[in-house]
Image: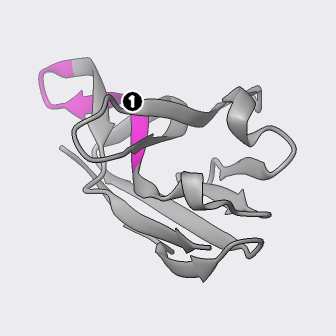
Amino acid sequence: QVQLVESGGGLVQAGGSLRLSCAASGSIFSINAMGWYRQVREKQRDLVASITSGGMTNYADSVKGRFTISGDNVKNTVYLQMSSLKPEDTAVYYCKVDVYIDYNTGLRYSEVWGQGTLVTVSS
């Protein structure tokens, strides 16, 4: 099994910054990609940013130039530096890892989600 531990959410004023972290642990054989998604109430969960093990990044248009995703392959950790935050960035942010899990009987590809961390941006 693989577990994700997220941290860094909280309350911040508009224009401020926050840094989210997500650390993966467990029976990890390899990680293909890690990413951050966000969800507002019952709306769909949308991609914010992702990064592959090779360092290729992808951002939602709404966060380009304001958010930066980075990863530490040794620590199996992904970070999301959020700057110039806006009230519309308020959401629950979820970490997702695309990972090959090492079971005794072999490898299995899986998408593992974190528990979510709330980011609230006040105006």
Q: Name which residue type carries label 1.
A: Val
Taking depth in this image into account, of 98 and 19 the one nearest to the observer is 19
Query: Left or right: 115 with respect to 56?
Result: left
Residue extending furthest left?
Answer: 105
Taking depth in this image into account, of 108 and 58 the one nearest to the observer is 58
- Confirm whether the magenta stretch covers residue 102: yes
x, y percent for residue 59: 70, 31
Residue extending furthest right?
Answer: 65
Considering only vertical position in the picture, is 60 above or below 72?
Answer: above
Give the residue displayed 69% in from the left and 72% down from the top: 14
User: What residue is disc 1 on?
Assistant: 99
The quadrant where residue 77 appears: bottom right
x, y percent for residue 73: 63, 47
- Per the image, label 1 sits on a secondary structure element best described as strand
- Confirm whether the magenta stretch covers residue 89: no
Magenta stretch, overall SS: strand
Taking depth in this image into account, of 110 and 89 the one nearest to the observer is 89
Give the residue displayed 70% in from the left and 63% down from the top: 85
Query: Left or right: 13 with respect to 45?
Result: right
Considering only vertical position in the picture, is 13 above or below 61?
Answer: below
State which region is magenta. 94-106
| Colour style of the rendered protein structure | one colour
Looking at the rendering, in which quadrant would you find the C terminus?
bottom right
Give the residue displayed 77% in from the left and 50% down from the top: 68
Number of other residues with Cα within 10 Å of mark 1, as a class: few under 14, some 14 to 19, many 20 or more: many
Give the residue displayed 63% in from the left and 58% down from the top: 79
Looking at the rendering, in which quadrant would you find the N terminus?
top left
